[in-house]
Image: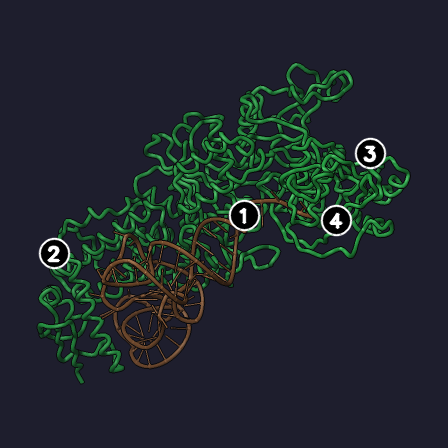
Amino acid sequence: MTRIVPDKPSLDGLEAKWDAHWEAQGTYRFDRTKTRDEIFSIDTPPPTVSGSLHMGSVFGYVQTDAHARYRRMAGNEVFYPMGWDDNGLPTERRVQNYYGVRCDPTLPFDPDFVPLDRPPDPPISISRRNFIALCHALTEEDEKVFEQLWRTVGLSVDWHQSYATIDELSQRTSQKAFLRNLARGEAYSQDAPVLWDVDFKTAVAQAELEDRERPGAYHRISFMRTDGEPIFIETTRPELVCACVALVAHPDDGRYQELFGSVVTSPIFGVQLPLVAHHLAEPDKGTGIAMICTWGDTTDVTWWRELDLPTRAVIQANGRFQEESPDWVESEQGRAAYSELAGLYPNQAQKKMVELLAASGDLHGEPKPITHPVKFYEKGDRPLEIVSSRQWYIRNGGRDDDLREELLTRGEKLDWVPDFMGVRYKHWVEGLTGDWLISRQRFFGVAIPLWYPLDDDGLPDYSAPIVPEEADLPIDPTSTTPPGYDEIQRGRPGGFQPDPDIMDTWATSSLTPQIAGHWDDDPDLFGRVFPMDLRPQGPEIIRTWLFSTLLRSFYEHDVLPWQHASINGWILDPDRKKMSKSMGNVVTPIPLIEEYGAEAVRYWACNGRPGTDTAVDFGIMKIGRRLAVKILNAARFALSFGDDVAPDAINQALDLSMLAGLAKVVEQATSAFEKYDYARALEVAESSFWGWTDDYLELVKGRAYGQGPEAGSAHAALQLSLSVYLRLFAPFLPFVTEEVWSWWRPDSVHLATWPEAGEFSGFGGDPDILTRTSAVLAAVRRAKSDAKTSMRTEVAALTVTGDSDVVAAVSAAEPDLLEAARATAIEYRDGEFAVDTVLAD
RNA sequence: GGGCGUUUAGCUCAGUUGGCUAGAGCACUGCCCUUACAAGGCAGGGGUCGGCGGUUCGAGUCCGUCAACGCCCACCA
């Protein structure tokens, strides 16, 4: 092949050039004729396309790509699909803001609806179908932006294998898996108190909670005993006195022994309540007596359930106190008081209630301000309330110790990278307090594929849901007629009604191996890629994505979904603070790619150790860019001596020595990659490469410019070592390595074989020769530097002192050293290593 | 309140089973247009490896303990 080495090689434009070339050549196309043992399959995290692009998006994906490229070169057929996570709340929220709309499911579909150019304020209400159409339209645009970014940073994804969590295959897979969970008894519905976001008006799962420290206050309130004596409680939620069902103290609390089983009367409302005992009541908290409401917090739910207390809920799904006075409040005065709370939000009701209690004399002393943790939906802005409603659950071990044990054991069998991440899984599973709530009262997602029969009074029978045929999936029960019914029976007594909910986004994302591997519609492919080899992901979604994927795979296939889970660290802003939209410190990748180049950004990402938090660091990007430029220039030199020379021409001691050292580097880089330590592999290759350019190239330069077999040895060694370095760097710097490779090789470096030490270890070189000779050269340079003179200055006399090993090593490469040092002869002396340089005038 | 991680040069970080004088890059200083590279090269100064205690011939590395920072989890009275 004709060698075309540019005079002034440059990084400019390489990303676009090679992306287009790879696409045209199908370089990363998956070959599905390969068998499971030849294939390396990756369960790529589908990015949330409605989120903003930031450096965190680039960080983990580039690391995974480096590993994928290594595997491909090492001989595996790499199954590397890309998914888009577009279903769910983030998309709905983005659509609401982007178009200025709200979904109102009661509105009819408007086929002529077109969103306004600018989002109107206040937003306009549109039908569910119109809303979903906007979700699809916007995510499609977002996905294009993401794909372009991925291409620019050089992900070696097979773009023919992409999927979206809202596409038809995902919906079918998700509904099918759910129906199978249902058939096996792994999924169930129940009417129970759930954590509820009053703004999004949906239930949320344990995995989506976060605690936030909020100000509150202890209010000391008196209830009345039958003997007319007051009994005091302290509460942060006085507004819930009307929802109180009992008072509770610890069974061993001596102060209240004779009162257990007695009746007290609530202030203002005059409701009679039992005083009960339960071990969760803490004697040293407040007065030792707590008021149990339905429901102020999750402890209330526990008490309510375990003590079999009545339900007296007043907070509705919209977050407000119900309008009508509850029937358990019987007194005139109580009903009047309630009417002042009706329709209020809890914080408003609290103020009102405090006024009422103060006026009646049941509030004692000033409220004591405190700060306490309050549960929030991770995407929400107001504290969660607890509301009773019917929801669907998948059993996850939270209420079943045997299952929990099983899932813990399976987590232990997974190879965690780094291994301490396995502890997070363990703690999460051990801390589960209930089953996985998968239904959401939202719109853009995969529908729960069920209907319920209606009895003669038009009431649904939730115990006998009507199930669709698998062949008919995916279905939307709100617009599909169930088998055995006529559409006219929808909502009629004796007819049916659809389940109106959708599934949690994780209920679909937990099936990414099944979706990407086409479990549903291509069992042959699925058998070739599943169980997968690698799940790369972030630490914050171990409790959601990783756990739920493991769970679904356990249920459906009784197997771990992957062998290895590689968990990347957090991305911090340049000041080492966590990046977040709200803090306004999000660093976006595109300007950085434009300034430093994709290779530089990749280099930065691959410098972050597995599982280690990593700050955006422009300094490291500069180093990456410099490395890429260095590769171009060094390659230009190495390839500037005419045609290819076969490796068997290599016979000079220095050349053989260099290759022997390189063989060790290859071994180290390979072993690092095998341990998923891409950063180590890069570090090893890089430090060796700088030695190659700084010392070997300088030492061999003079000989290489000459003629004859000594020059031929240099040319062959340069070509061989360049080929090795290009392949070592190819996983990290795919563009520049491909560019250089293309100067003298016909195929893609990314389809070349990963270097093996055996390729060139047969030459029998001694690595010490290059090391020792380089040390002498460095000493000569130092002498010239100290003399503040040019490196071209001639050396009048050069004395190398050392033991016999040093003398043997240096003299083996003496001609090269003399030329590089600009000396004419070396005098050797026995003794401790030293170099004495006398410069010419 | 539990758990995990981090703490090494001014900054960002390596340091793989304990072993010769603790490394890199940035920043800083000096020199050099040398036919691969001046958006470069060569060289130099700079650290009692968070504190204390222990094991060992030998500890940045192992053990104990304390501290700071970060993250995860925890029943909101």
Q: Which element carries disc 2, helix, strand or loop? A: loop
Discs 1, 3 touching: Cβ within 8 Å:
no
Residue A585: percent from left, percent from top: 57, 59
| Residue at (81, 43) in percent of width and height | A224
Q: CA distance from mark 1 to mark 3?
A: 57 Å
Q: Residues within 10 Å of mark 1 (few under 14, many from 20)?
A: some
Cα distance between the residues tagged 2 and 3: 99 Å
- Which chain: brown? B
Q: In x, y percent, where is residue A549?
A: 49, 35
Residue wearing tag 3: A328
Residues at marks 2 and 1, CA–CA distance in whole angstroms = 53 Å
Using residue A552 as the reference point, say whether residue A655 is left or right of it. left
Q: Name the residue nearer the viewer: A169 or A684.
A: A684
Choose the circle earlier in sequence order: 2 or 1: 1
The residue carrying pointer 4 sits among few (fewer than 14), some (14 to 19) or many (20 or more) residues within 10 Å by Cα, namely some
The one nearer the camera, A247 or A692, is A247
Observer able to see residue A134: no
State the separation of the CA atoms marked 1 and 4. Answer: 25 Å
Residue under the point 29% across and 62% down? A690
What subunit carries mark 2?
A
| Image chain in green | A
- Residue named by callout 4: A120
Residue A460 in view of the camera: yes
Q: Amino acid at mark 2?
A: Asn
Q: Quadrant of the C terminus of chain A?
A: bottom left
Give the residue at the far top of this rendering.
Answer: A484
**Mark 4 and mark 2: span between their CA atoms?**
77 Å
Quarter of the image for residue A195 reads top right
